[in-house]
């Protein structure tokens, strides 16, 4: 009998995973963090080393893993387009082989398992905002496909293990999330703009900047993930988690420049292939079944993230 809930977090040294490890430990869980440091970093979890209820294991989840835990959060997968397109075959492998391994593990040890899926399963959506019932508009042969189709196949595997092997599954479709501990060279828009603005470099807008995204602060997202894991077994998802406010990329650039007290100019660069035009979550379901509502407004979250990068940049010069 284990007094503390034993929780495995794959991708635990990444941006979201490291915040999740923090929250689980603060709630009294015994945390096993598994990561191969593909995009994650020891810096993100350095403050946890020495905590007797935290354990770090360097491992690639495309290979089998034999451990004993009560719950699994499956977050291992590069999330930024630059990183997931760097080795697209590995991106599909981590989503397909990695998910099969984690589902096989969950089946053997009868653990509850949560998948970090993504709004990318909706592709370049023709329905706006996106409810969970929308099946998406995804290109299966483009440069984003390794991630989009990989995550879609992972959802298929989760639901087949649920139907075929009666696993307890939870699938979260995460929309754009930002905050401290994003990688300095992450490549996603919020960290790119902040780092450019703080360095006084031009802020790079891809396309004309009229495309939209909705941005959720990391603390809100982690709260949503943990509520989903703790929900009753009937709640499998897929469940959208994100913050509904929608901003154009040009609006975001201006806000970041202003809040960083920067003199950076904005410059326009070509729009990458298959870049979604607009995206905003419909979180009606998450509100109903989890009683969850993101609280941190964009400006407040940006200020915290700017402060983080400011400190990081001054310590790495
Ligand atoms: P991240 O790149 O910071 O974290 C991913 C982590 O997974 C890294 O620590 C990386 O080293 C690790 N990893 C990659 N391949 C692995 C492998 N084969 N074995 C073990 N570890 C491996 O990204 P993030 O933003 O923290 O995203 C975490 C999860 O959430 C991902 O699955 C991502 O697809 C999903 N997600 C994130 C967002 C977002 O906006 N942050 C949005 C949608 C979905
Ligand atoms: N697996 C794992 N850890 C476990 C149990 C299984 O990594 O504790 C992997 C194993 O490599 C297997 C995969 O999960 O290939 C799928 O397991 P499952 O039992 O569903 O299928 P099978 O073993 O029949 O292929
Ligand atoms: N983007 C941008 N400049 C950058 C990085 C991204 O204009 O330096 C744009 C990108 O083309 C997309 C949006 O910002 O339209 C969000 O990009 P991100 O990579 O953060 O996430 P995703 O496209 O996966 O939502």
Image (spheres, grey):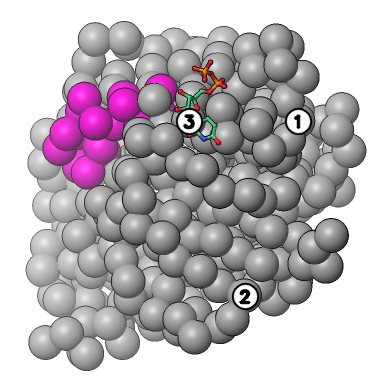
Q: Is mark 1 on a helix, strand or loop?
A: loop
Residue 53 is marked as 2
| Of the image marks 1 and 3, the number of the one nearer the N terminus | 3
Vertical relation: 269 (above or below) 221: above
83 in the magenta segment: yes
Q: In which quarter of the image is residue 54?
A: bottom right
Query: Is the residue marked 1 within 8 Å of ligand 2, measured from its CB?
Result: no
Q: Position of residue 132 (x, y in %)?
A: 66, 22
Q: Give the residue pinned by disc 1.
A: 168
Which residues are the magenta region? 81-96
Q: Do the residues labelled 1 and 2 touch (CB within 8 Å)?
A: no
Q: Is residue 312 visible?
A: yes
Chief SS of the magenta region = helix
Q: Is mark 2 on a helix, strand or loop?
A: loop
For ligand 3, the image quadrant comes to: top left
Number of callouts: 3
């Amino acid at each position: 009998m284990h007094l503390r809930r034993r929780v495995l977090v794959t991708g635990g040294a990444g941006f979201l995973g490291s915040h999740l490890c923090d929250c689980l430990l603060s709630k009294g869980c015994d945390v096993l963090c598994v990561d191969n440091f593909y995009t994650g970093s020891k810096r993100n979890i350095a403050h946890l080393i020495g905590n007797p209820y935290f354990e770090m294991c360097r491992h690639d989840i495309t290979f089998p893993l034999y451990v004993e835990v009560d719950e699994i959060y499956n977050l291992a997968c590069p999330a930024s387009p630059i990183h997931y397109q760097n080795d697209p075959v590995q991106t599909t492998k981590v989503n397909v082989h990695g998910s099969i391994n984690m589902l096989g593990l969950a089946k053997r040890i009868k653990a509850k398992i949560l998948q970090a899926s993504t709004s990318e399963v909706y592709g370049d959506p023709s329905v706006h905002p996106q409810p969970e019932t929308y099946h998406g508009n995804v290109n299966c042969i483009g440069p984003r496909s390794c991630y989009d189709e990989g995550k879609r196949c992972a959802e298929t595997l989760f639901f087949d293990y649920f139907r075929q092997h009666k696993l307890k599954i939870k699938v979260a479709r995460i929309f754009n999330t930002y905050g401290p501990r994003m990688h300095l060279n992450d490549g996603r828009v919020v960290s790119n703009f902040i780092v450019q603005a703080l360095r006084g470099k031009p802020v790079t807008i891809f396309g004309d900047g009229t495309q939209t995204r909705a941005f959720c602060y990391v603390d809100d997202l982690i709260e949503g993930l943990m509520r989903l894991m703790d929900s009753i077994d009937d709640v499998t998802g897929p469940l959208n988690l994100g913050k509904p406010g929608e901003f154009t990329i040009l609006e975001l650039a201006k806000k970041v420049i202003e809040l960083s007290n920067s003199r950076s100019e904005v410059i326009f660069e070509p729009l990458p292939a298959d870049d979604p035009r607009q995206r905003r979550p419909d979180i009606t379901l998450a509100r109903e079944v989890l009683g969850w509502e993101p609280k941190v407004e964009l400006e407040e979250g940006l200020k915290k993230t700017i402060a983080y990068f400011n400190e990081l940049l001054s310590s790495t010069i």
